[in-house]
Image (cartoon, rainbow, N blue to C red):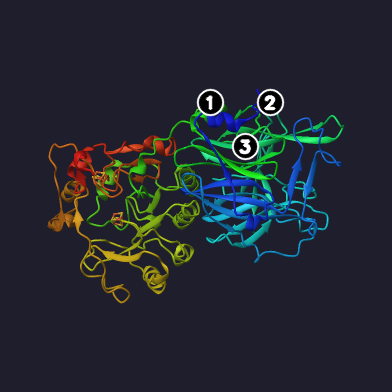
Amino acid sequence: MAIQNLAKLVIDNGGELKPLIISAQQTNGTGLMNPSIFNDSGKLICNLRHVNYTLMHCEGTQVFGNRHGPLAYLNPENDLKLKTINFMLELGDNLDIKRYEKIDTSKCDVEPMWEFYGLEDARVARWDNDLWISGVRRDTTPNGQGRMELSKLDKDYKETHRYRIEAPIDTGSYCEKNWMVVEDLPFHYVKWANPTEVVKADIETLQSKQVVLKEGVGELQNMRGSSQVIRYGDYRICIIHETALWKNKLDQRNARYTHRFIVWDLDWNIQHISDSFSFMDGEIEFCCGIAFDKNENLLISFAFQDNAAYLLKMPIKYLEKYTNVKFEKKKEYWRTTEYPTLEITTSIPPKGCVVDCAFCPQRLLMQKYDSVKTLTYESFVKIIDKLPKEIRITFSGFTEPFLNQRTADMILYAHSKGHRISVFTTGVGLTIEDIKKIKHIDFDNGPNSGFCLHLPDEERIAKHPITPKYIETIEYIKSVENEIKGFYVMSMGSEIHNSVRHIYSTAYLPTFWSRAGNLLGEAIIKPELEKIKDRFNHMEHGDKNMTCNCIETLYHNVLLPDGRVSLCCMDYGLEQILGNLFEQEYDDIIPTPFSCFSLCSHCENGTEPKNIK
Ligand code: SF4
Ligand code: SF4
């Protein structure tokens, strides 16, 4: 059943409606419309379209329209063009506007060739760490041909780059608009909602290509884009619009816009199409944005009659009731730390890590691991796509990360998806080309992070295979070390190995621990460790139930090449496998906060849950 006034229903169910108004000094009092809300990693921002006209639209029975019909654009007399200017608003938790900036387009502007100026109905997205607005522009040809454009914005909301994207198949089409940006898939748009057609834009070639085309579902197959498409749990959601043409009593043609929610699963199968609704029972209404706030309310940004912009806060419970879809609440236990981390073991070679450090329980790992040897790039991508972007990705794990030739590409991919990155490497397997690829990355500077280079020591506690190529790589790293954020060197012995001492004469020497007791057994089967076992410490907590007191708490887990995830970097015996990310979701495998593990009873980081503050 169609809903005439969604805003009222939402307010009656615990929601809220906020007008989005900026100073008339900047707008001259003309239209504010089609806002696009976006949750930028916790900061709510909203693109607000300002037009240089006021739309007069006669609603209801439309018997008192103007002489030309129910709709008229009231422009300044000396400026008959239909101009759009965009503003970016920053909103507080209460949805009040804290500040706003006119988006400065001067760097990319050229003389308009048609009467609609500017980027219309821009939707906001953050893709590959850059902030984008994307809408239709019709001022680049004398006939008003419309194409979706992408504008990259800097931190001051100044447009730095502009890309005009060609349609994927019918390159001669007149107007491409209302493609819905897909928040979690860079440069992807839902071009048509049902049948679902997803296209990907290429900002190098300025072309787009169809990447998904599904069979249509049901009768409702004239659905055009409106909001962005956003991810929530295992679903993607958007609001679409439909246009119904009709004639009023005076036989004048007019249109009524209504909207619907669409919910897809992650393979773009439509799960639900809601009843149609009007926001405030108007005939001209339009929605360009949706986002979840930190309390999981759905924020919907829409305009009424091209003149007024609003933000509607819809509690998730009401959204579930309205869409008939249960959006399972995520547990997100990892939010108990600022530094949730997944370490990546990119390979486990048949004989273990080639560096075979004395202080590393590789023999134990070899006894316990008999599975997939190499994490493929494709598998890594699948896992990263499952992770919340707040999870820090550390390339370290149970072996040297660069033993896998695709590690630099994995680093680039995880970084492009917005994850904080750290690297711990001996430099073995690392090439000069790898360094060139990744040195620009802003490696995380939080605790237990950065870019750590583990150098060989003169005693050969760590047994780096030292070749002329290895030395050349270390020399290259030295030449660019100032460009690598968070860079430092460490060694397992007090004296750096002679072969690289001319490059680094000293390095940080950490305190060694028994890796939750695992080195005690290792020493029995590894003579070189037995000789220096007085150089590592061990802590026993007895029978007490212990949890983790690291800054990452229980969320510094280690991925194995076969998709399994182990509790932490101490667990070389693979005693505490939490689950498998090839088969399960991240949220389903991570432990509840402050749970106790037997491993923690032998670890210097273990503590009793009652001691956790
Ligand atoms: S400490 Fe690192 S480099 Fe050394 S053997 Fe273990 S995983 Fe390999
Ligand atoms: S306390 Fe437990 S979870 Fe934390 S590092 Fe030690 S063994 Fe791992």
Amino acid type indicated by mark 3:
Ile
Q: Which residue in the protein does label 1 denote?
A: 321
- Confirm or deny contact between disc 3 and disc 1 (CB under 8 A): no
Q: Which mark is residue 424?
A: none
The image quarter containing residue 288 is: top right
Q: Which residue in the protein does label 3 denote?
A: 239
User: Where in the figure is residue 333, as x and y percent of width and height?
Assistant: 35, 39
Q: Is mark 2 within 8 Å of ligand 2?
A: no
SS for callout 2: loop
Q: Earlier in the sequence, mark 2 or mark 3?
A: 2
Q: What separation in Å lies between label 1 and label 2 (alpha carbons)?
A: 21 Å
Mark toward the viewer: 2 or 3 = 3
Q: Quadrant of the C terminus?
A: top left
Mark toward the viewer: 1 or 2 = 1
User: Where in the figure is residue 10, as x and y percent of width and height?
Assistant: 55, 31
Q: Which residue in the protein does label 2 denote?
A: 218
SS for callout 1: helix
Q: Earlier in the sequence, mark 3 or mark 1?
A: 3
Query: Image height check: is 62 above or below 498?
Result: above
Q: Quadrant of the N terminus?
A: top right
The image quarter containing residue 106 is: bottom right
